[in-house]
Every structure is written in C-alpha cells, then in structure tokens.
Image: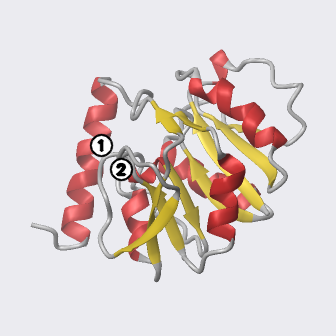
Amino acid sequence: MYSIVIPTMWQSEYLFDMLPIYENCELVKEIILIDNFYQKKPKLDKFKKIKYYSEFKNIFVNPAWNVGVKLSNYEIILANDDILIQNLMEVLMLIKNSDFDFVGISWDEVDELKIVEIDEFKRNGYGCFMYIKNYIEIPKDYLIFRGDYILFNNSKKRGELFNPKIKGDIAKTRGNSEIFKEISQNDLKKYKINNQVL
C-alpha cells in the first residue's frame, strides 16, 4: 500500500484531475498534501484519504518531501502536483510486483508500460513521480533541486518507468520566478561542491 506525498502551490489543473484517481485507487491509502501556498487552498472535504499539512508559508519541495514522509504510514511515492497518470492502478501494481528500490518516470512517448533498470539519474522530469523504498532525509540546505538526485544515489536497484498514459505541466510551479531561480542556482552549486561534480 502507498502514501502519495504531494507538495503543492495549486498552480496546475492536473492536480484536481489526479486527486480523484488517487482517492479511488485501492493501493493508495493516504494522500499527503503539503500546502506551500495556503492562501489558495481549495475545498478538499470530499477526499477521505487526504492528510493536509501546511506551515502557512512556502517551505519548498525538498523540505516538504521530508515532512510528508514523516507523516506517512505506507510505502512512499513522491509526486508532483502537475502530473496526470490515467492508469495509476496498473503503474502501482507494476512497481509493487517489481524488486526496484527506486523508480522515476520517463516522458518519452511509448506504447508499453514497463520499468527498465538504469544506472544514472535521468533528467527532464524523471523526479515528477518517484517510488522510494528506503527514504533518507534530504539535507535541509537543499530547498528545490537535487533532492531527487540524493535519493536516487542512495538507492540500489533503480528504474525508469515508461508509461503511455501520462500527461504533465513539468515545472509549472517553479516557473520563472527570480527567487526560485536564485534558490535553484544555490542548490546546484552546493550539490556540485558536495559531490565533487565538475
């Protein structure tokens, strides 16, 4: 059974299409929403599986993942709020019946649902939906970027999920805000220094 952890700023309509899919999926036991823009919070009363959490400010995505995992009771899926997975039950069954420690997604157009083993982190949306068997807390000084890299690098068998039934607004929330750009650049610099990346 799964806990779906979703940091959100309510900027993508896909979240409101996806919440009923999570709600109606038997393998999803709880949807943990970390609200980073509480002023825009919609009514959520109709969703019985939602655990709502807010610090009434934007704590950013990596700290939100840490909080969400602490609140969770089942196996972890970290999900963007701007992704739509139409065949969620099939995806979770595939993950459940596999022996992967970490699974992210591909945005390639494909005809077949499958997981392929990989050795290196895939860019361009791989971290938009991640299954993590053994979560480790992301260091507090990483706010937006490289939390997914850290989780990937601390997992053993890692896979890429290919799915013909996904849509998304990749990085819609981050957008072009100057504060997000500055934080993102700082995260990247720290990661390069700490991991000796050239």
- Quick one: label 1, few (<14), some, or many (20+) residues within 10 Å? some
Identified at 50% across, 50% down, the residue is 163
Q: Which residue is mark 2?
A: 145
The x and y percentages for residue 18 are 67, 33
Q: Which mark is residue 184?
A: 1
The x and y percentages for residue 134 are 59, 75
Please tell me whether residue 91 is drawn above or below residue 165 in the rendered image: below
Q: Which mark is residue 19?
A: none
Total numbered badges shown on the rendered structure: 2
Which quadrant, please, contains the N terminus?
bottom right
Q: Quadrant of residue 14?
A: top right
- Quick one: label 2, few (<14), some, or many (20+) residues within 10 Å? some
Q: Are marks 1 and 2 in contact (CB under 8 Å)?
A: yes
Identified at 88% across, 25% down, the residue is 45
Whether residue 59 can be seen here? yes
Give me the C-alpha separation between circle 1 and circle 2.
Answer: 6 Å
Q: Earlier in the sequence, mark 1 or mark 2?
A: 2
Q: Quadrant of residue 37?
A: top right
The x and y percentages for residue 24 are 83, 40
Amino acid type at circle 2 is Phe
Which quadrant, please, contains the C terminus?
bottom left
Q: Secondary structure at mark 1?
A: helix
The x and y percentages for residue 95 are 62, 66
Please tell me whether residue 65 is drawn above or below residue 169 in the rendered image: below
Whether residue 51 can be seen here? no
Colour scheme of this structure image? secondary structure
* Residue furthest front as drawn: 111
